[in-house]
Amino acid sequence: MSGPDDTAPGGPAGPGRPPDPDPGYAAPAGGGAGAPPSGSAASRLGFPDAESPREPAAGVPAPVGQAPITPALVGQAPITPAPPPAAPPAAKIDVEPRWGPVRNAAVLATTTVGLFLLSVLSDALGNILSDLRYVLGVGGLFTILWLTRRVLERNRNRYRDLDSDLVAPGPPLRPAWFRTPAPLAGRDSDVYRGLDIVCRRGLLAVTGLPGIGSSAVAEAVVAELVERGYVDAADTAPFDLRGWSTRSPDDAPTIAGRLLSMFGAAEPASAEPQILADAALRLRDELSRRPAVLFLDNVIDAGQVTWLVDQWTTDGSHPYLVVAGRPTIGAAFPDDCVVALGELDASSMRTVWSAEQPRDGGEPQDADWLDDVLAVCGGRPGAVRDLAREMGRPESHWSPAELTTRLWRHMTSDQDPRERVWLAILERTGVSMSRKARHLARALADLPVAELTVEAMEAARRGIDALDAMESGGPATSHELGRPTPPQLDDIDLVDPIQELCNRYLVRRSPVGRYRMPLEVRQAVRATEPDSERMTAVRAALSSLVHRYADLAVRWSILLDSVDYARSAALWFQAEEPLLRALLTASYVDTPTEDYPEGELLALTLDDLARLADAVDVWYVRQQQVFGARLVHENLVKLAYTAGRHDLDRLAAVRMAAVYRSAGMFDDAAAMLSQAGVPVPADRWSWLPWRRPTAWDLGAWHHHERALLHLARAESATDPMMAAVELAGAELELQRVWQRLPRKNVKGEVTTLLTMGVVYLHQGRPDRALDRLDLAESRSGECGDSAGQAHAAELRGVAAWMQGRATVAAALWQHALTEFRKLADHQGEGRCLQHLGSAVLVAPELAGLLLGEDRRTVTEVAAIQHAHVWLELSRRLRAGQPVSPIADGYLRLARSRAGRSHSPYDPDLAGSEPAGREVGRQSQGDAMVVRLVRRFRRWWGP
């Protein structure tokens, strides 16, 4: 399968969103548990790319989806653009695809009924006109009804407004080195050795067992680099790589995306080695502008940093890379770049203990018991600090004998020393905790999420409140766990359970307001609390957490299509996606019962997980994130199968087919579609009329994904005959989609019409494609679908270029670029810049049209320079996606003509991006009238 084509349109996802030319994946989201709603996630369309079988005329730019430029063109003298290929014979215009005997009969019956009602109304009006008071009354009534309708139409899009609790986070903040390193004991030689290594090689890995002090040593090395003037504190970027999931550490694509987003660069779309290598080079380039240090702390596995180390310089030049973590990460580094830490000696351990004790407490007089206590800590300064903090806590009253006895009771050779310490602490102090705090600790120990935001912690606490109300004889039931309950006077706590856990150091709170229960504490809680009680607490907290984030994600996914709030929604998804992925990839294993064979936890959370997956899928399609989507949908397929939910199983199978298609795994995609095609068993309520639209919607989605699979196969086909057969299959499937779409699914209609337009563009029929795209633009305007209008404009530009109307195409792409910028859709913005840059490269006279009316006359040299800038910016915006041969070829040609190959951000070209273009739009009422008139004329005559 060919790589994504930068010259084709595509974009965000949203139910009814057009597909992307890059082999993206479809995902109309589902509204309730199990059924795709009328359009909360978009489907990706295919578009002709570099391996399309058609041969273009010389000089035709990539935006039309033609074959890539030939190697002979690159590096030659400027090409004289040939006229675009002539348009094929005009096809019969068929703007409204829905037709047939059934529809004609329905229209005839509707007309008959309408005439009958009109006669009845005329008789009634004749009676009313006999009295003027009735006339005024009826007129006033109709005026009120008309005003009410206008108000309702205006409020229909009020869902786009931010609610009071939807507060967008700020943009990612790149950290700097404004911290004071903790005092070290017995590690001076390790610090100076690490400093020597990083200055000579530019790479350093400080490794050791958990709690051994590897983070403190690495911090001391970085502090020395700043103190000695090797780097500036503002150019030192520290990152803590402790992941969100408690089941597994963050993978390489997740870490790469997190680091690159901090520097405003595009995240990698998949885990392919070439894409990760490109991400490492882009990150290194961002840090190379000034002497800098990248400090990665708490790395667990070598695979988390191998992609970065392989592309880093090892000659001691800037930037520097310092990594602290487990002993396993040493395999990713050269042997002479690793500092392995051992256990601290007894004297250093005593120094650490004294540093953590209160200033007025003095050093213990009985050295014998202290030596016994420190011996249990196994040379781990982290264990010593935890124990010293517990001893210094005002509410704790430990005696030396009790402390020694409890610690040595857990002295086993295979146990982590920090876990020994917390086992002893919880055995003694756990009974003194409040009931809610103990429930919350049990839940946090088994939650699939290791780090919780304030919003997430409050959601978990609400679930615990519901559990506590149920145990206290309140109104809560097992089905109400996780749902907010009104506070009762008797339930008011004197001490907040979250604050209580923080005071006991069971939960650590970061300066930005995030909560984390350390691994050793979670292990100790699991060992000291009964499994049944922990599972009860997890059911309450996790169901509440999933329910809350499903609500938030659905609302933010709607705002992704809002011109006013798209940027805020994108920031929210960017910040919360790791947490959402951890929730969606958890196992949700529970003990089967007679009422819940799949387990009560899965029964409580599955519907909310389906809604959450729908909303997150909108973000994945928009960002073309195949890697994250595959993890989420694979797990959803397993959960739906385990729960025996055939509706969700079919839904997730269609999504997985889209993921396989986007990865070029066509056979696997076809197999998943066959699995999804199994009829859903009817239930006793299937005869209800409001149950049918859901089934029709799911069937339409299934056929739409089949159409996209045909389209992807046509793109990758080398035989023109096979490509034509696949395109015919795609057209047939889209006709089935149109027949099955519910009338109220307007965004689904927009998506289908855009896909039809793409198929006709593949077939070289721009006139027929424009019929579909005009209707798509009209329908998207009626439902307020801003992204649909942007995609329609982009595709119409492609069709106009194929017809030889270069200026019209440039204006349409410029308009689409303006709309994508409003929606903060960087992928769509990058595609439009690719269209415009390649077009100006072929036809330099278009540059004056794109730069605005207030510009002076543009020379051909300046036009080529602007095209080069736009192509470079397009590559930057779409970095992280597979490389397109077309985009790469035109970029090389632009560099050779512009006479340079470095970054495009030069002072003399500042502000050279294409000017915005606004296009007037009809109101919804006017558009509806025009559409009705067109339908009437098509029905009754030419």
Image: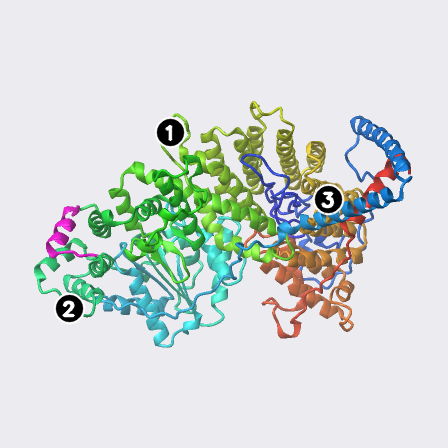
Q: Are marks 3 and 2 in contact (CB under 8 Å)?
A: no
Residue bearing the label numbered 2: 362
Nearer-N-terminus badge (3/1): 3
Is residue 706 left or right of 59 when viewed as pictured?
A: left
Report how many numbered discs are placed on residues in the image.
3
- Give the residue type at disc 2: Gly
Q: Does any portion of residue 624 appear in the rendered image?
A: no
Horizontal and vertical percent position of residue 826? 61, 56
Residue at left offset 65%, top offset 55% = 831
Q: Which numbered disc, 3 or 2, marks the residue closer to the eye?
A: 2
* Distance from the alpha carbon under mark 3 to that under mark 1: 58 Å
When the figure is inspected, residue 720 is found, relative to residue 822, above or below; the finding is: above
- Give the residue type at disc 1: Pro
Pick whichever, 718 or 851, lies toward us: 851
Horizontal and vertical percent position of residue 479? 44, 35
Residue bearing the label numbered 1: 592
Taking the magenta stretch, the answer to whether it contains residue 404 is yes
Taking the magenta stretch, the answer to whether it contains residue 241 is no
Element under disc 3: loop
Task: Say few, some or many: other residues with alpha carbon within 10 Å of mark 3 (under 14 / 14 to 19 / 20 or more).
Answer: some
Residue bearing the label numbered 3: 54
Horizontal and vertical percent position of residue 877? 59, 58
When the figure is inspected, residue 202 is found, relative to residue 653, above or below; the finding is: below
- Give the residue type at disc 3: Arg
Image quadrant in which the N terminus is located: top right
Pick whichever, 88 or 220, lies toward us: 220
Image quadrant in which the C terminus is located: top right
Q: Which residues are magenta?
A: 396-412
